Structure formats: C-alpha cells, structure tokens
Amino acid sequence: MKYKKTTYLLLCLLIVSMIFSFTACSYKTRTESPKAKGRLVIYTTFYPLYDFTKKIVQDTADVKIIVPAGVEPHDFEPSLKQVADIHEADMFIYLDPCMEPWAEKLKDTLTQKEVIVVKAGAGIVQNNDPHIWLDPILAKKLSHKIYDAIVMADKDNKDVYEQNMAKLDDMFDELDEVFKAELSGLVAKDIVTTHDAFGYLAERYGLNQIPITGISPQQEPSPKKMAELVDICKQKGIKYIFTEALSSPKLSESLAEEAGVKTLVLNPIGGLTQEQIKKGKDYFSLMRENLENLKIALSE
C-alpha cells in the first residue's frame, strides 16, 4: 500500500512538472513576440491604413490588419479574438467613426492598456464621408498623421521612418500629377459609381460623381431612383457604369442593362482580394488601374 501511495505521489509530481514545463514554454513563446523583442506592434483596421503604415515602417515594425482580404470594410465587426489582440498591441490605427464605429468604442479601454490610439482621419474626413484615401493629396496628409504617431512612439528609428515617408510622399505626388495630366484634357466628366465613394477624387480632378447608392454600399436605391439614373445616363451620353471589386455588381449591371451601356471596375480600394495579393497589387497600382478605366469611360 505504501509503495502504491509513493508511486501515486511520483506520478502527480510528474504531471505537475509537465504542466509547468508546458506553461513555461508557452510563456517563452509569448515573450518572444515582436513586442517583447522591442519592435513596435501596430494594428490597422483596413487596407489603405495598412498599406501606408507598412510603407512607412517597412521591416522596422510589425504591421497587422484587422479586416481580412476579400471583405468589404463598411459595417465590418471584429471578432472577440481580434479585439483581444488589439489590446496587446503598441499602437492601433483607425480612420474615423463613420468608417469603423466599432473602433471608436475601443478607444477608452485601449488607452487604459497604454495602447497608442491614432484616429488618422481626424481633421481630414468631411461630411461623414471616409473615402479620403482615394484623393492622393489627402492620402498623403493621412499618411503623415500615421508617420507622426509612429515617430513619437519609436524615436530610435526616426531616421528610417523619415526616409520611408519621403519616398511615400514622392509616390503620392507622382500619382497626383499623373491623374491631373491624364484627366484634365478629357471633355466628359460624369462618372456613375456603385456607391458614393469617389467624392474626394471627383472634387480633386474636376469630375462629377453620380452614385447609385450612398456612402455605404449596403444601401439599396428605390425603383424610382434607378429609373432616374437610367434617364441621366441617356441624357448625359454615359457609356459605362462602374462596378467595384468587393461589392456585388448586381445593381450596376442592372443599371447598365437598362441604360444599354457597359460596365468597368472603379475600385474604392477598401480592401484587396486574394488574387490581387498574389499578384503583388497595392494602393498605387490599383489607383493607376482606376485611372486607366476612368480614361476609357470618359474618352468614348
């Protein structure tokens, strides 16, 4: 009996030892995270913020995105795990409550956890329209707000971030110049879009946006509105209706069929598809694709 009791005690000690070893290994894995190694861990909500942030930090910090590839960012809600992950970051970057209302709700608890919260669209977003990144000049301004926050959080790598920001500035300026040069000479100015996402771009380059739906692509137009849009297309001689990459093309295709015109993609670049990721697409390549399709639609 004494032998059995001793064996039992030894077995319990072995189990406790194994649990302790497993816990220690798990803890070691956690402490070897980028944050523990001194690298800045930054969570961004959706693609444009991720792309601009990544171009600013390159490999000096770790940048993560909340809205997954192929998902339309309007009305997105993060999982509990994603929310927990954000609370373990050094910095959280979102655009504006009109784009990510859920992000605004996290602000207080993140601040309590000493996570730096960056509302990147503050002072830039107008009239609850979040699509500022589609104007290269406003996208540049947006990126500088991200840059300022990163430099404040990681002064040791300021020189690296400064060099990367200068390159990004050049890319925005070049994109702006190309848009101005290519669109300024076109006589037609009216574009019919899936949703009201291109107001900033239209204002920058002298275009007239006619959206099928409102700022959120989930809004449904009435039959009366669709009939009015058909008449507008015929009166203005519009040859193309623009669809989007991450939203259903049903409304745009229906309008195009009724008006007897074609469709083309005008990408609001709220997110990338898996196919675009595989091809190495980014904000700048997609904006240039948008420009080419605008030229086609406004030249015929």
Image (cartoon, grey):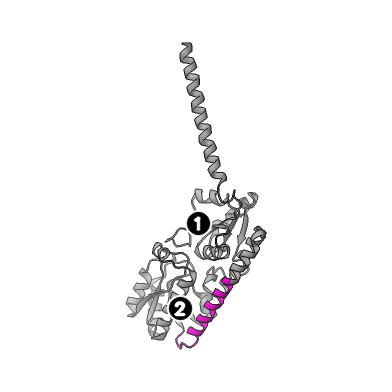
* Magenta-colored span: 167-188
Considering depth in this image, is 5 or 124 the residue closer to the camera? 5
Find residue 77 and name its label: none
Percent across and percent down for residue 195 are: 45, 71
Q: Which amino acid does label 2 sit on?
A: Leu
Considering depth in this image, is 72 or 6 the residue closer to the camera? 6
Question: What distance separates the C-alpha of mark 2 from that of mark 1?
Answer: 28 Å
Considering depth in this image, is 44 or 110 the residue closer to the camera? 44
Percent across and percent down for residue 157 are: 64, 60
In-image side of 195 versus 150 (left or right): left
Find residue 66 and name its label: 1
Against 270, residue 24 (above or below) is above
Q: Residue at x 51, y 72 (%)?
A: 134
Percent across and percent down for residue 128 are: 56, 68
Provide the major secondary structure of the magenta segment.
helix
Q: In terms of sequence position, does the residue under pointer 2 or pointer 1 come before the other?
A: 1
Q: Which amino acid does label 1 sit on?
A: Ile
Q: Residue at x 60, y 71 (%)?
A: 166
Q: Which residue is drawn at 48% across and 88% down?
A: 185
Residue under numbered circle 2:
291
Considering depth in this image, is 212 or 63 the residue closer to the camera? 63
Q: Residue at x 48, y 60 (%)?
A: 75
Could you classify mark 2 by the number of other residues whose Cα lies within 10 Å: few (under 14), some (14-19), or many (20 or more)?
some
